[in-house]
């Protein structure tokens, strides 16, 4: 079944991108909020949640701006998930812009899952 692209923006009450970038861009940071465990070897990342493991390939990284992965199951598609740091010009506060793909009947569940992950991220970095 074809997946549909969706985007979610999460305003963060912080101006410090260094801690945020470290938390979203490295395996140890990702294992603090996104998965129970993350291991990386070059561009291959293994994400583990309890008894479930999923492999993704790092396909794009712009330091302090964005990181983009493609799940192994999506390797022959244009689907990816991306975590991007944006900055409000007016207030100077940072936001996370999440881009992901899901089947139409799973988009609401995917958004709820991102909501949960980002709440954990906010607690981990103290915002």
Image (spheres, rainbow, N blue to C red):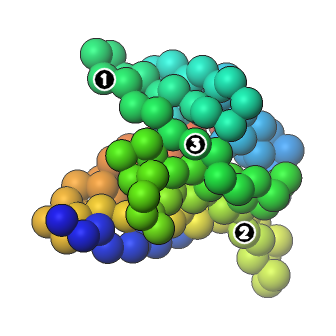
Q: Secondary structure at mark 1?
A: strand
In the rendered structure, find residue 57 and report the number of the disc placed on it: 3
- x then y, percent, for residue 37: 51, 19
Residue at position x 30%, y 55% in the image? 110
**Foreground residue, 104 or 124?**
104
Vertical placement of residue 104 versus 38, above or below? below
Image quarter (top left, top right, bottom left or bottom right) of the C terminus:
top right
Q: Is residue 77 above or below residue 72?
A: below
The residue that appears at 58% across and 31% down in the rendered structure is 45
Extreme front residue here? 76
Disc ID at residue 52 = 1
Q: Quadrant of residue 66?
A: bottom right
Q: Earlier in the sequence, mark 3 or mark 1?
A: 1
Residue 38 as seen in the image, left or right of residue 71: right
Among the two numbered marks 2 and 1 on one chain, the one whose residue lies closer to the N terminus: 1
Can you identify the residue that label 2 sits on? 86
**Distance from the alpha carbon under mark 3 to that under mark 1:** 17 Å
């Amino acid at each position: 079944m074809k997946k549909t692209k969706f985007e979610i923006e999460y305003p963060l009450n912080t101006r410090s991108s260094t801690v945020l970038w470290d938390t979203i861009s490295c395996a140890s940071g990702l294992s603090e909020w996104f998965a129970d465990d993350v291991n990386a070897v070059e561009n291959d990342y293994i994400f583990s949640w309890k008894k479930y493991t999923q492999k993704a390939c790092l396909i794009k990284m712009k330091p302090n701006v964005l990181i983009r992965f493609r799940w192994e199951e999506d390797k022959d598609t244009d689907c990816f998930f991306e975590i991007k740091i944006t900055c409000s010009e007016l207030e100077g506060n940072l936001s996370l812009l999440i881009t992901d793909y899901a089947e139409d009947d799973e988009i609401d569940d995917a958004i709820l899952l991102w909501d949960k992950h980002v709440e954990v991220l906010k607690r981990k970095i103290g915002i």
